[in-house]
Amino acid sequence: MNNSVVVVDDNDDLLDSLTDFLQMKGFNILGCGHNGLEAVQLYEEYRPDVVLLDLSMPNYDGIYGLENIKKINPDAKVIILTGHYTEKNRQKIKPFNVSKIMEKPCSLIKLDQVLRSLSIA
């Protein structure tokens, strides 16, 4: 699949904004989730080109999602979108070779540029 994206965030307004923008820019949104477990399930089902993943979510956080997506495919492209980027989170993320970490709120134009730089567009 080309330009395929899964978006995972517990904020519905942000999910809607991201998916609307990315669709307008020509990306194929394969699915949306609200926690790390849903991120893993969506990745397993669709194998998207990239996953946009929040870190701070209820029940199963983004670290859970990242760790388990990378178990499925160590080369999976994951962009972390977070409003809670702490040193503790940085240390937890470090072993998983994420494609990019972007702090929220982030520019949608910058996100589009990052996705294109990953050669998925």
Image: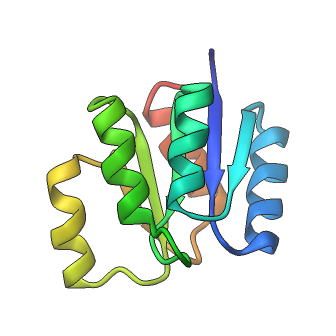
**Residue 6 seen from this side:** yes
**Residue 45 location in percent, x, y?**
61, 29
- Residue 121 can be seen in this image: no
Residue at figure coordinates x 54%, y 36% from the top left: 43
In the image, residue 45 sits, relative to residue 18, either above or below, namely above
Quarter-of-image position of residue 78: top left
Q: Residue at x 81, y 73 (%)?
A: 13
Instruction: Give the side of residue 36 with respect to residue 7, left or right.
Output: left
Corner quadrant of residue 2: top right
Residue drawn 39% across and 42% down?
Answer: 69
Which of the two residues, 61 or 7, is positioned nearer the viewer here? Answer: 61
- 10 sits left or right of 20 in the view: left
- Hey, which quadrant is residue 55 in on the image? bottom left
Q: Quadrant of the C terminus?
A: top right
The percent position of residue 108, horizontal first and vertical second, equals 66, 59
Instruction: Give percent across and percent down for residue 14.
Output: 74, 70
Which residue is depicted at the point 50% across and 60% down? 36
Toward the top, the furthest residue is 1
Question: Camera-side residue: 22 or 64?
Answer: 64
Q: Is residue 83 above or below residue 50?
A: below
Residue 27: x %, y % from top left: 72, 33
Residue 66 horizontal side relative to residue 94, left or right? right
Number of numbered labels in the structure image: 0
**Colour approach in the figure:** rainbow
**Which quadrant holds the N terminus?**
top right
Q: Please say if 73 is above or below 66.
A: above
